[in-house]
Image (cartoon, rainbow, N blue to C red):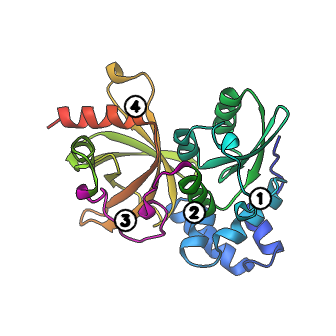
Amino acid sequence: MLKKNKKIGEILIENHVITKAVLDKALEYQKKFGGNVTQYLITRGYIDEANLVKCISTQFNCPYLPLASYDILPEIIKLVPSSIAKKHWLIPVDKLGSIVTVVMADPLDTDAIKEVERLTNCKVQPFVGILSDIVKAIENYYGVKIEANALKWEEEAPLSLDEKSRGAVERRSSIRIKAKITVHFPVQDEYKKAETKDISSEGILFESANTLPIGSYVVLQIELPPERGAQPIAAVVQVVRAVPLPDKKFDIGARIIKIAKEDIDKIIEYAMELQ
């Protein structure tokens, strides 16, 4: 079991990656606007992926495994479907007896670990890896293409992909639909309520009384009517736009990073019914 013993900021300072003054600035920004300290540091150029991974490895006593040094066998790749690899940003690299070694962007994702253990009937030994390296490995070993714009630290980006690259069914779901759907998201220690303006299979635009830092990752709880499901739908999104409005509110544009396909289909279907 991975165990947290120090805050990530303390580890970054101890490893001389940032200064206390920089951390204080990041914490002050987080206090005002919410979000994640490490994402703030990355988007402002104070740290990079490699330094962050090393610090996560130290903080959680989880070994770092550089994927470039591995030549993964086809029978190992077949243990985990590409859909699961892309869903959780992970890749299997080895298997010894009843233990499968998995490199993960988030080695604390217990849901991902349980899913891989169920599929492989093995115990997972998690290693932390650099997200961009994991993406390259997934593309290489599974022969799939992952949209690069989902990984960039951009201040502004479109909320849907180029429709020319999609088939007819995909184009239908990537169109931005004007629909008001209630969403909730965390700011510091409480959840705030907001309402969507536009929604597509790639992103969400919602109006909020609270701004969010560009580049930060947020878990949105999307609330559909009770007959559509008893529980809100969780989506991991990345904030790509935060525009002040005249009424002191903000338009927040967020790119969807992780959501179950059946859930986004359900949301799109409901949004289209509101037209």
Q: Main secondary structure of the magenta part?
A: loop
Amino acid carrying label 2: it is Lys
Residue 97 position in % (x across, y down) = 85, 33
User: Distance between the Cα atoms at labels 4 and 3?
Assistant: 26 Å
Residue drawn at (62%, 62%), measured in percent from left and top? 133
Which residue is labeled 1 in the image? 65
Which residue is labeled 2 in the image? 31
Residue drawn at (80%, 53%), measured in percent from left and top? 60
User: Distance between the Cα atoms at labels 2 and 1?
Assistant: 33 Å
Amino acid carrying label 1: it is Leu
- Along the polypeptide, which appears first: circle 4 or circle 3? 3
Task: Name the front one of labels 4 and 2.
Answer: 4
Q: Secondary structure at mark 1?
A: loop
> Residue 262, labelled with which disc?
4
Amino acid carrying label 4: it is Glu
Which residue is labeled 3 in the image? 241
User: Distance between the Cα atoms at labels 4 and 2?
Assistant: 35 Å
